[in-house]
Amino acid sequence: MTGTAVIIPAKDEADRIGATVTAALALSGVDLVVVVDDGSADRTGQVARAAGARVVRHSHNRGKAAAMESGAEVARLLDGEGEDPRHLLFLDADLGETAHTAAPLIEPVRAGEADMTIAVFVTRVKLGGHGFVVRLAREGIERATGWAPAQPLNGQRCLTRAAFEAARPLARGFGVETGLTIDLIRRGFRVREVEVEMAHRATGTDWRAQIHRARQFRDVGRALLARKALRR
């Protein structure tokens, strides 16, 4: 049976990355966890390595999409010769021990029932924003594909290697999830949302959080514009 590689983009997540890696390594069928240290200023890479992950480091912050591609390339290089390529499970670094609930994302892909699964968090944390980025992504995806996902920006996703390669080059930065969904559905891949019991750190309301949301909005808008999915 095809194995699964977990790819975890991470920046300044030393406080949570160890628990996330430990939980990911305990998932059935997972034989590789790759943490991409995307220019962290803390001990993210060291903590991840101590927890059992393979670590690749970007010397400066290159963004989520670049980290995902770096992690997927490491997994490709470590795939056994002559064996089916591993499926790719992308997880956020701040999931902590709740990463152990990712199994439902893997199962439909492993069974050949889906080419990409997207997590829907059953337990929702209270977010500091007003949902405008989520609405932008959801409405754009629906215009482009006819399908309106419940949580369009959720980064917890499992893909076949073929689906991942078909979506490259990935949309830049925080537009990566929106671009992935549109590109794969348009190319005939099967995409399914799956409920999971995960939880990550809520985004706050301070100026850093507002800048983060502005960057999300910019990147999602760029992904939609490139796919002609923005409202005129």
Image (tube, grey):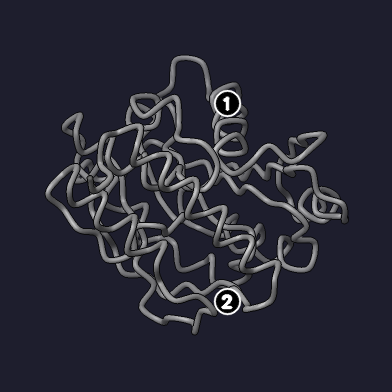
Which secondary structure, mark 1? Answer: helix
| Picture residue at 76% right of the left edge, 52% below the top | 48
Which secondary structure, mark 2? Answer: loop
Q: CA distance from mark 2 to mark 1?
A: 30 Å
Q: Tell me the residue that label 2 is attached to.
A: 202
**Horizontal side of residue 19 vs 137, given as left or right:** right
Q: Tell me the residue that label 1 is attached to.
A: 73
Question: Mark 2 or mark 1: which comes first in sequence?
Answer: 1
Percent across and percent down for residue 38 are 73, 43
| Picture residue at 80% right of the left edge, 54% below the top | 44
Percent across and percent down for residue 213 are 55, 62
Q: Amino acid at mark 1?
A: Glu
Which dot, 2 or 1, sits closer to the camera? 2
Percent across and percent down for residue 31 are 56, 43
**Horizontal side of residue 57 vs 200, given as left or right:** right
On-image quarter of the N terminus: top left
